[in-house]
Amino acid sequence: MPAIRPVPPRVSEPDLPTHLTPAPARRRADLLQASIECSGETDLAHGSLEQCMLTGAAERVDLTGATLLDVRIEDLRAPVVSLRDASIRRLRIDRGRIGTLDLSSARIGELEIRGVRVDYLSLGGAKAEDVIIADTMVRALDVPQATLTRVRFDGTRADEVDPRGLTAKDVDLRGLDALAYLDVLSLRGATLDSRQVELLAPAFAAAAGIDVRD
């Protein structure tokens, strides 16, 4: 039998214990089974977080270059959350309001984003496998030069998507209601439904050098 395409993401819940120990945020922290209340400038850059929970309201949450394994971020409100250059394995971001969610150049295996409002979501240059983005509102979604494998959108809206230089395999965009794509030819390898293709037909024609006139 032919393989089912696109292949769905293989995403599981972060494995968290029943009880977590409150811990302060600090740069290069090595935290295990900790609960972190984010506030002010929360600096966890280049740290290691395993089986941890983050929540709260902060001016900035810095996880640049951090290693995350079985981590949940819940009801977080922050203008900036940086996961740039992070190594991620099983991360779930639930609800909350984030200005900039920066996952640029991150190495990602199993990421779930649900019910979050994000102004700017960047996966530029990231290598991401097994990702679900659901019930989320995004103003600008940037994935230039990213390599995305087994990625699915469900009930998600975006004003603008920048896919320039995207390498896509089993990327399911049928659940993404996007108002505009900056480069439709970079969607090669992604899956769209017929309605989306009809809406994008003028952009496809223009990219192919076709002059359409009624």
Image: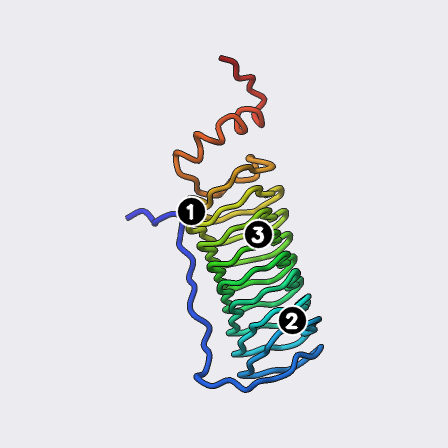
Q: Could you say which disc has been placed on residue 147 in the image?
A: 3
Q: Does the CB distance between marks 3 and 2 fall below 8 Å?
A: no
Q: Cα distance, mark 3 to mark 1?
A: 19 Å
Residue 213, position as x, y percentages in the image: 52, 14
Q: Could you say which disc has been placed on residue 71 in the image?
A: none
Q: Could you say which disc has been placed on residue 66 in the image?
A: 2
Q: Residue at x 62, y 41 (%)?
A: 164
Residue 162, position as x, y percentages in the image: 60, 43
How crowded pointer 3 is (Cα within 10 Å; few <14, some 14-19, many 20+) is rated as: many
Residue 198, position as x, y percentages in the image: 43, 29
Q: Earlier in the sequence, mark 3 or mark 1?
A: 3
109 is higher (above) or lower (below) than 22: above
Q: Does the CB distance between marks 1 and 2 fall below 8 Å?
A: no
| Residue 200 visible in the shown view | yes
Quarter location, residue 97: bottom right
Q: Please state which of the two labelled residues, at mark 3 or mark 1, is closer to the viewer.
A: 1
**Element carrying mark 3:** strand
Q: Earlier in the sequence, mark 3 or mark 2?
A: 2
The front one of 148 and 196 is 196
Residue placed under numbered mark 1 in the picture: 175
